[in-house]
Image (cartoon, rainbow, N blue to C red):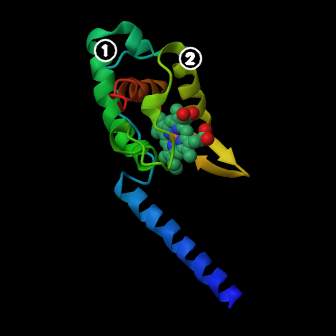
Amino acid sequence: MKNRVIAAAALSFVAIQFAWVEVGLTHGDVQPQAVDTEGLEALPEDFALENPYRLKGGEQYELAREIGASAYNSNCARCHGLEAISGGIAPDLRMLEDGEFGDEWFMERVRKGYSQNGAYKMPPFDAILSQEAMWAIRSYTETQPRPE
Ligand code: HEC
């Protein structure tokens, strides 16, 4: 009897996991997407320490946010939530610190990803996204309104 209860519990747990995967897939493409950053000023090879488009401000920052929104939707939203509002699967990126400190942490995670017990919970994006695309995504998430 006890075993059956455990088996049933295990099965429903698996079902819940599958349900989550399905929900996740509707939130964006599964394959990482290359990002067209035309119009954004190209950056030197060395990674910037602080969001260069925020520092430039004006039209470059505006464009970075636009490109970042679409790059976010196709690469990050399935885990971090539409419009950067987390559904609980992964942290809410609106809550990252402002400025250079938040920039540094953002880049660390985006470039290297995050793995636990040998399995990637978040894939590394170093070989997938250009530095320009990464900063564009940062420009988008840092300007999404935080919850009240
Ligand atoms: C497969 C799911 C998945 C995808 C896709 C994904 N992430 Fe993550 N991300 C996670 C998880 C899980 C964590 C939590 C890891 C940890 O404990 O630090 C995380 C953590 C982060 C963090 C650190 C947040 C914090 O509060 O410390 C940043 C920044 C981040 N992700 C950015 C991104 C960006 C930008 C993208 C898209 C380019 C992205 N992630 C795509 C799952 C994902």
Q: Which mark is residue 92?
A: none
For the residues carrying marks 2 and 1, which lies nearer the camera in this image? 2
The residue under the point 56% across, 71% down is 13
Residue 146: x, y in percent? 37, 29
Farthest-out residue, bottom: 1
Badge 1: few (under 14), some or many (20 or more) residues near its Cα, within 10 Å?
Answer: some
The answer to whether residue 128 is seen in the rendering is no
Q: Sequence-wise, which precedes: disc 2 or disc 1? A: 1
Is 42 or 107 nearer to us in this picture?
A: 107
The residue under the point 44% across, 52% down is 31
Residue 101: x, y in percent? 56, 17
The residue under the point 37% across, 15% down is 41
Contact between labelled residues 1 and 2, with CB atoms less than 8 Å apart: no
From the viewer's perspective, tell me whether residue 83 is left or right of residue 13.
left
Q: Is residue 129 above or below residue 2?
A: above
Residue 35: x, y in percent? 38, 35
Residue 54: x, y in percent? 39, 13
Residue holding disc 2: 101
The residue under the point 37% across, 44% down is 74
Q: Is residue 111 above or below residue 43?
A: below
- What amino acid is labelled 2 in the image? Phe
Residue holding disc 1: 60
Q: Quadrant of residue 71?
A: top left
From mark 2 to mark 1, how far is it between C-alphas?
Answer: 21 Å
The answer to whether residue 88 is seen in the rendering is yes
